Structure formats: C-alpha cells, structure tokens
Amino acid sequence: MASTPGPHPPRKGNLWRTVKAVAWSMLGVRKGSEWQEDGVQVTPLQVIAVGLVAIFLFVLGLMALVKWLV
C-alpha cells in the first residue's frame, strides 16, 4: 500500500519577494536558484495579483508617457 505524503507546510511569501519575482519575470532576467526558491515560497495567487497590478501600472505609465510626448 502506497503511503500518502503528509500535508505540506503552508507557503510563506511576503509582498516584497513577490514584487521582486514579478519584476524580474517581466524583464526576463532571473537566476535559476532564485526561481526555484520563489516556487516554494510564493503562492500563485500572490503572483497573479501582483502581476495584474504591475501590468496595470505599466500601461498607465505608457499612457502618461505618450500623453506627455504628444
């Protein structure tokens, strides 16, 4: 009979680590070791939430830049 693994400890991700992970991902630059650590410490919900906010701010920044230039 196969034994089932015990419950995993809850992930503990903080906001700064999530923001850093999303920022580096948007730039496309990330160390493999840090990427693996983020996979363990940051929850997918945190990444999605911070990613949506980052994209929203990026688009607003582009719109402001275009308005300022034109």
Image (spheres, rainbow, N blue to C red):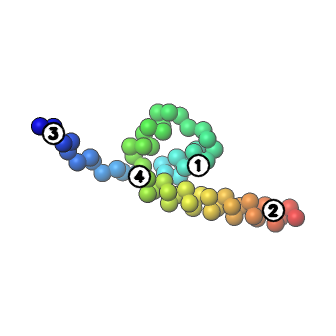
Q: Quadrant of the C terminus?
A: bottom right
Residue 34 image point, x, y percent = 48, 37
The number of discs equals: 4
Q: N-terminal of the two: label 1 or label 4?
A: 1
Indicate left or right for 21 with 60 as reference: left
Q: CA gap, disc 1 to disc 4? A: 16 Å
Name the element at disc 4.
Answer: loop
Three-letter code, disc 3: Ser
**Position of residue 10 measured from the top left corner of the image (x, y, whole percent):** 30, 51
- Label 3: how many residues lie within 10 Å, few (<14), some (14-19) or many (20+)? few
| Spatial separation of the CA atoms under disc 3 and disc 4 | 26 Å
Disc assigned to residue 23? 1
* Residue 1 in sight from this viewpoint: yes
Residue occupying the point 62% across, 58% down: 55
How many angstroms separate mark 2 from mark 1 (CA)? 22 Å
Residue extending farthest front: 1
Q: Amino acid at mark 1?
A: Ala
- Of all residues shown, which one is farthest toward the left? 1
- Quarter where residue 38 is shown: top left
Which type of secondary structure does the marked residue at label 2 adopt? helix
Of badges 2 and 3, the one in the foreground is: 3
Figure quadrant of residue 63:
bottom right
Q: Which residue is mark 2?
A: 66
Residue at numbered disc 4 = 43
Q: Residue at x 23, y 48 (%)?
A: 7
Q: Quadrant of the N terminus?
A: top left
Residue 15 makes an appearance in the image: no
In the picture, measured across the screen, residue 69 lies left or right of residue 48, that is right
